[in-house]
Every structure is written in structure tokens, then in C-alpha cells.
Amino acid sequence: MHGKPTHPLKAVIPPSILPEAVLHPDHEQIDRHVMTYLLNTWEWPSEKHKQAFISWKLSEVVLFMFPTGEAERVKLACELLLLGFLMDGQFPPHVTPLLFQSLTKADYSDKNTLSTNASIVSSLHSLLTSPEMTVPVTTIDSMHAGLFAKFLTYPNSAPILEAYLAMLDCHCVPSRGPSSLSSLKEYLVFRETDVGMPICVELLYWTDPALAGITADEKRMLRPLEKLANYHVSILNDVFSFEREWQAAEMNGEEGGALVNGVAVLAGEVGIGVEAARGLCVRLVRAWEGEFVRLKGEMQVEGRLRRAVEGIERRMSGAEAFSWRTGRYL
């Protein structure tokens, strides 16, 4: 999937060599369920915010990445990742540039400090580790308490929720941003957690019943492919979102407004303009695809491992398919 002819990045990003992405067969039902819940439960400050969220079709990123997953599990995965998106408050600058959304409609326009954000996330840690001793106080608490409880009715779900909270922790780091990262290599390590890649790694094996029995040794074998997929998804996301994030950082020079984007990191590291850096990032993404295909061919795996490799591949092609289709970056 290589975007509509009118897409502004059509001439910048060459076609992928990966197989075409497909949506989950139950995508309409899953999307309807998750969106209905979030639209009716999250505290939206205005109809404008809600309509922006609807227009981006964010559930498609999950439905493209995990098309072989069991429907009820994919539904929970979709709910978790979209709730994480709302927590991060990544609305375009003309809607709101907050890092985290405030707890009530009245406070929605007040920007939270990182210490406030850390307090919010700390309460979520308590809800996960000590649910019987923690009483949900806010809408954010209640939504997470209910979601955590649903996940924990399934075996092997704890690593997913731990990875989710680690992502939110990452967004409360005072030094978050390119100024604390001296190289693209450091940025890629940081970005794996920042953009939620460990969650997606765990979700692949958790949502697909055929991969439920995958062993720790098999996961170690697949780790080089997972790393390539994480880099691919992270940097391609940076390419698509650069203009929006650049504008948001310009509007918010104070706490919480740092530009966290690989294009900017690479431009600063090698001393080139951002357009040239974006072109290099695109070439890196396609080079990682080539390396993935090479390693896949060398492994020559069958059965469950082959299905896992194809699932990792779908994480890359699915995330890209979403990026071409969503209106979030336009």
C-alpha cells in the first residue's frame, strides 16, 4: 500500500518490498466496539477533539498489525493502544498540544507538568500491582482498572500491561527529547519504548492463538527480526509525523514540548537539513526491509516460527498501511 496519488509524501517514500498489509477480518465490528466505548467514556473537552479522534481511524493500526489474532484479544489490544494514545495527548497543534490530557473537562486546557503526569502514571502502576488496595479516583483510573482486569483474565497478559506502563513512564522523563540523545543509535533504543514497540512485540504472541506456546528460546531467535521491525516502524512513523511534531514543538518550547523525532536527531547528528535527513530516514527504512528479507531467508523456519516471522513482517507493513491511510499526519 503506497498511498493515494495526492498524498504529500508520495514522491518522498518509495514503495515497500514487503507483502501487502490486510485488515483483521472482523475489523468493522472491533472498531465499532472500541470506538463506541472510548467516545462515550473518555472526557472530551469539545466535539472538535472527538471528531479529530474519529477522523484518524486509529484502530486501523492495530487491525492491520494483528490480522490473525483472536477477535476478543485484538479488541482488547486495540482498546489498550488507543487509550495509550489518548494518555499521550498526541493531538495536532491546532487541536491541543498537551503531553497528557487533564483529568476533567474543566482542566483540559491546563497543561500538566511532568511531575503531575508522573503522579497519574504512578496511580496506574498501583492499579495494576495492587488492585485490591487501590480505589480508582478519576476517569483515567477507572478506564485502566477495567481494562487491566479484562486483560488479566487471560494467561500471559501481565508483560503486555507492564510494557504499556513502561511506555507511559518514558513520557514522564524530564530529559525526554533529542537534547539528551547524541546519536541515532541511542535514539532508536529510546524510541523502542517511547513509541510502544515492546507492547506490540508481546501483543503479537498474545493475540494469535497459534503463537501462544512460543518459547523463550524461540523469542530469542526472533529478536533480530523484532529489532529491525521496531526500527522500521519507529522511523517511518517519524517520517510521516515530522511536520506535525515540528509544529507542535515550535508552539511549545517549554516543558513537554520537545521534538522527539528521528529526522531531527539525524539532522543534528550529521549536520544536514531536515529534508535531507528525512530522505536518509526513508532510505534506512527500506534498507531495514531488505535486511529483514535477507535474515528471513537465512532462517528457513517452518510451522509456528514461520507464522511468527510473518507476524513480525505484518507489524511493519501494517503500521505503514495505517500511516498512508490516516488523516492524522495530513
Image (spheres, grey):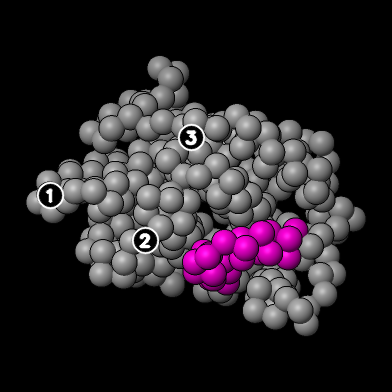
* Residue 319 within the magenta-colored segment of the rendering: no
Between 151 and 243, the residue placed more toward the observer is: 151
Q: Residue 83's x, y, as percent?
A: 65, 53
Q: Earlier in the sequence, mark 1 or mark 3?
A: 3
- Residue 213 tag number: 2
Q: Is residue 157 above or below residue 22?
A: below
Tag 1: Cα neighbours inside 10 Å, few (<14), some, or many (≥20)? few
Q: Residue 16's x, y, as percent?
A: 27, 33
Which residue type carries mark 1?
A: Gln
CB of mark 3 within 8 Å of CB of mark 2?
Answer: no
Q: Residue at x 81, y 70 (%)?
A: 136
Q: Earlier in the sequence, mark 2 or mark 1?
A: 2
Which residue type carries mark 3?
A: His
Which residue type carries mark 2?
A: Gly
Element under disc 1? loop
Give the alpha-carbon distance from disc 3 to disc 2, as whole Å: 22 Å
Q: Is residue 251 visible?
A: no
Read off the magenta span: 143-169
Between 312 and 268, the residue placed more toward the observer is: 312
